[in-house]
Amino acid sequence: ELYKGSQSKPSLIAPGGFYDEEWFVKLLQTSGFGVIDVMSHHMYNLGAGVDPKLVSKILNPDHLNKAAYTFGNLTHIIRRHGPWTSAWVGESGGAYNSGGAHVSNTFVNSFCGLLWHRLMGKVVLNVEGHASPFLRSYAHCSKGRAGVTLLMINLSNQTNFIMNAQNSINLKLAANEQNISRDSFTHNLKKTFSWVGTKASDDALLREEYHLTPKDGYLRSQTMVLNGIPLELTSTGDIPSLNPVRVNAKSPITISPLSIAFIVFPNFEAPACG
């Protein structure tokens, strides 16, 4: 009624709460066709900030995978009951209730938002394979430049992942797991995964690597280390330079235990990236 006759009106976004399948379905059915433009929900996949098990949840692949289940269910509901609407995450974080003390403000809770914003474009590439569930991998078209950026998160506290990039129709990364536990037992388990629908150049090119670790190896450290250099604000309070190391694109990639790495392939050709 308010916007009747107006050439423009705001989008109606609802409900903005935690995902509840039965309630979300009823909302779409009751409101009717074309009323709700965006279905939004909150995403705090670690639960309450007072939970003493926050760190174990962060490092548990099975727990982290529950987020995909929520997105899958919501997508199904929209396709079946409200194809005129789209899904948004209206509010998000690790743990709700303002996070968890001595967890949310430390390395273990970091997803490197600034580097993600600078390096990862909006086009998401499919990552296939059967590598260890403790090695999280994500691929996007690089932001504002040609190429592809790969994000690797090693949730294991005792395994190095060593990968070799091979030029082929699909970029394949053969991953070796190197156990570095106290008994010095080592084993190599070859894994492969690839970006679907991509083509690599045969030229010997450089890639850029950003390896992030906690200071002194302490997961709850409030100081993040980039390529071996602790990150500290400048004397004027500005964000320090976040510089990568550049290595031969064909050399092995090593992802240390409990670390995060952004790997940028500036000249990797992916049709989806245009």
Image (tube, helix red, strand yellow):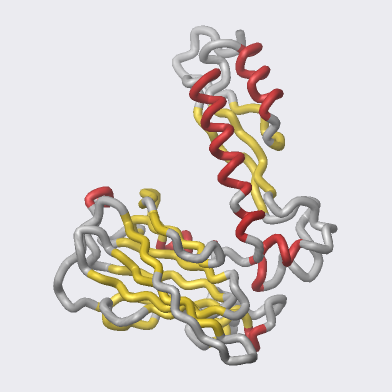
Q: Residue at x 49, y 24 (%)?
A: 79
Classify residue 52 by image quadrant: bottom right
- The residue lying toward the viewer, choosing from 267 and 152, is 152
Q: Is residue 251 left or right of residue 214?
A: left
Asked whether residue 72 appears in the rendered view, the answer is yes
- The residue lying toward the viewer, choosing from 242 and 271, is 271
Classify residue 36 by image quadrant: top right
* x and y percentages locating residue 188 in the rendered image: 44, 79
Classify residue 222 by image quadrant: bottom right
* x and y percentages locating residue 109 in the rendered image: 66, 66
- The residue lying toward the viewer, choosing from 186 and 244, is 186
* x and y percentages locating residue 266 in the rendered image: 27, 68
Asked whether residue 242 appears in the rendered view, the answer is no
Q: Residue at x 71, y 60 (%)?
A: 57
Total marks shown come to: 0
* x and y percentages locating residue 48 in the rendered image: 80, 52
Q: Given the current orientation, which residue lies at the most extreme left position?
A: 202
Q: Residue at x 38, y 83 (%)?
A: 245
Q: Is residue 165 left or right of residue 245?
A: left
Q: Is residue 200 left or right of residue 143?
A: left
Q: Is residue 224 left or right of residue 44?
A: left
Q: Residue at x 30, y 72 (%)?
A: 165
The N terminus sits in image quarter: top right
**Picture layout, residue 234 above or below residue 109:** below
- The residue lying toward the viewer, choosing from 91 and 135, is 135
